[in-house]
Image: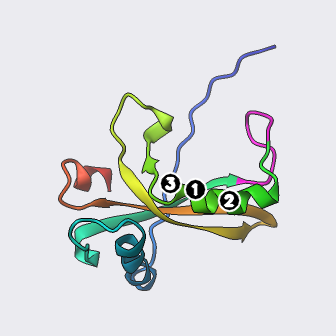
Amino acid sequence: METSFGRITAHLLEPTQERQQQLVPLINKNINPPDPVRESDVYIRAMYIVSNEVNSFGGRFPEDELYKLVELLIDSPVMVGHRKDKLPIGRTFYAEIVKRQNTIWVKSYFYWLRSAQGGQHLK
């Protein structure tokens, strides 16, 4: 078997101003930070996590499991490349099932504080 190496570039989705206003209350409800956050306190991004299509490892999630993943993702850390030797860059506060090009996806939303060290750079 031939080994291939490549590089993947990811672009995170930035919600519209209106959508961001809808999402901030979900941070306070689902994460319950010590001090409630305001829109001006956080950056919010979204990413497509998994679908019911065959993935790069040859496996796939059945559609019914995607609904369970939506629940399990809440309050999970966001790690770059699943690296556990580094601190998380954000926290997942909301996830939903969406249809994208006839494929069912789990779309998760995460946030980080603007005041966090490196927060502006991460943006």
**Rounded to the nearest whole Å, what is the CA distance between mark 3 and mark 1?**
23 Å
Q: 56 above or below 25?
A: above
Give, as a three-letter code, the residue at label 1: Leu
Q: Is residue 116 left or right of residue 50?
A: left
Image position, residue 107 (x, y; %):
60, 63
Which residue appears at 40% of the width and 55% of the height?
91
Task: Identify residue type, mark 2.
Answer: Lys
For disc 2, the marked residue is 68
Q: Secondary structure at mark 2?
A: helix
In the rendered image, which residue does mark 1 sit on?
72
- Within 10 angstroms of label 1, few (less than 14), some, or many (20 or more) residues? few
Say whether residue 63 is magenta.
Answer: no
Q: Of discs 3 and 1, which sits in the foreground?
A: 1
Q: Position of residue 29 (x, y in %)?
A: 39, 75
The disc label shown at residue 91, or none: none
Magenta stretch containing residue 53, yes or no? yes
Residue position marked by numbered label 3 in the rendering: 11
* First-in-chain label (3 vs 1): 3
Task: Say which quarter of the image contains residue 120.
Answer: bottom left
